[in-house]
Amino acid sequence: MNKTMLRSLMALHNENYSDLAKLLQLTPQTVSDKLNERKGAEFKQGEIAAIAKHYKMTDKQLIACFFAR
């Protein structure tokens, strides 16, 4: 996952972990764990879809953010 890209999208929309947590109905700590891939945490397919829709990500951005290493 490209956490820098996701953080950039959040910043462009003046959002933080708490805002993303509300969108995904998670705690800010869980979002932080997923964003930093701690404790084996990762975003689920539905969460990725919600993020992509919320930030109006193109397919290319989606792949670069969540699936490219």
Image: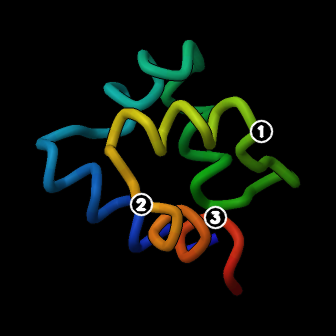
Horizontal arrangement in the rendering, residue 2 relative to residue 18 (left or right): right
Closest to the camera, between mark 3 and mark 2, is 2
- Residue located beneath label 3 in the image: 66
Q: In 3D space, how far apart are the residues under numbered discs 1 and 2 (Cα atoms)? A: 18 Å
Secondary structure of the residue carrying tag 2 is loop
Residue 26 position within the rendered picture, expressed as x and y whole percent measured from the top left:
59, 19
Q: Earlier in the sequence, mark 3 or mark 2?
A: 2
Residue furthest front in the image: 59
Residue 67 position within the rendered picture, expressed as x and y whole percent measured from the top left:
71, 71
Rendered residue at 44%/20% (across/down): 23
Horizontal arrangement in the rendering, residue 39 relative to residue 63 (left or right): right
**Residue 19 is drawn in which quadrant?**
top left
Compared to 57, does 17 lie above or below?
above
Amino acid type assigned to the residue bearing label 2 in the image? Thr
User: In what quadrant of the picture does the N terminus appear?
Assistant: bottom right
- Residue located beneath label 1 in the image: 44
Q: In 3D space, how far apart are the residues under numbered discs 3 and 2 (Cα atoms)? A: 12 Å
- Residue located beneath label 2 in the image: 58
Residue 68 position within the rendered picture, expressed as x and y whole percent measured from the top left:
67, 81
Q: Earlier in the sequence, mark 1 or mark 2?
A: 1
Amino acid type assigned to the residue bearing label 1 in the image? Lys
Rendered residue at 76%/39% (across/down): 45
Q: Residues within 10 Å of mark 2 (few under 14, many from 20)?
A: few
Compared to 10, does 6 lie above or below?
below
Amino acid type assigned to the residue bearing label 3 in the image? Phe
Rendered residue at 63%/64% (across/down): 66
Q: In 3D space, how far apart are the residues under numbered discs 1 and 3 (Cα atoms)? A: 10 Å
Closest to the camera, between mark 1 and mark 2, is 2
Q: In terms of depth relative to the viewer, which is nearer, 5 or 32?
A: 5
**Residue 29 is drawn in which quadrant?**
top right
How was this image coloured? rainbow
